[in-house]
Amino acid sequence: MLEPVLLVNDAAKYYGLYVAMPSFQDKNVVCSGKDILSVHKEAVRIGYKDPVVLYVPEKDTVLIF
């Protein structure tokens, strides 16, 4: 079985939300919310030119790609 890959620091705080991070290398969340466009706009507004926005699924949700 594969080990889970954590893309966001402190993911438990953000279950069910979209989060913006400076990059895939910097996993610190700069803002979060329920609407992807609002989260992106807020990240840009506070100075992140090209933020990475991800959805953090609820705990124990299995995603298969």
Image (spheres, rainbow, N blue to C red):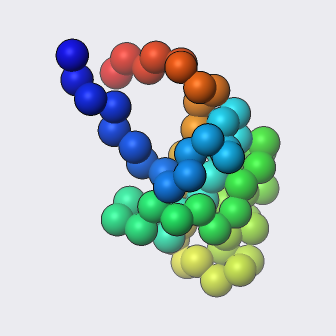
Give the vertical position of 51 relative to 12 (above or below).
Answer: below
Residue 13: % across, % down: 67, 46
Left or right: residue 7 compared with residue 3: right
| Residue drawn 75% across the image and 68% down it | 42
Give the vertical position of 32 relative to 50 (above or below).
Answer: above
Q: Quadrant of the N terminus?
A: top left
How many badges with numbers are in the image? 0
**Extreme-bottom residue of the structure:** 47
Left or right: residue 5 compared with residue 29: left
Q: Quadrant of the C terminus?
A: top left
Q: Nearer the viewer, residue 29 or 23?
A: 29
| Residue drawn 59% across the image and 62% down it | 29
| Residue drawn 78% across the image and 56% down it | 38
Please identify the quarter of the rendering in which residue 48 is found: bottom right
Q: Nearer the viewer, residue 23 or 41?
A: 23
Residue 47: % across, % down: 64, 83
| Residue drawn 50% across the image and 55% down it | 9
Residue 60: % across, % down: 53, 20
Please identify the quarter of the rendering in which residue 32 is found: bottom right
Residue 7: % across, % down: 42, 48
Res. 9 visible in picture: yes
Please identify the quarter of the rendering in which residue 26 is found: bottom left
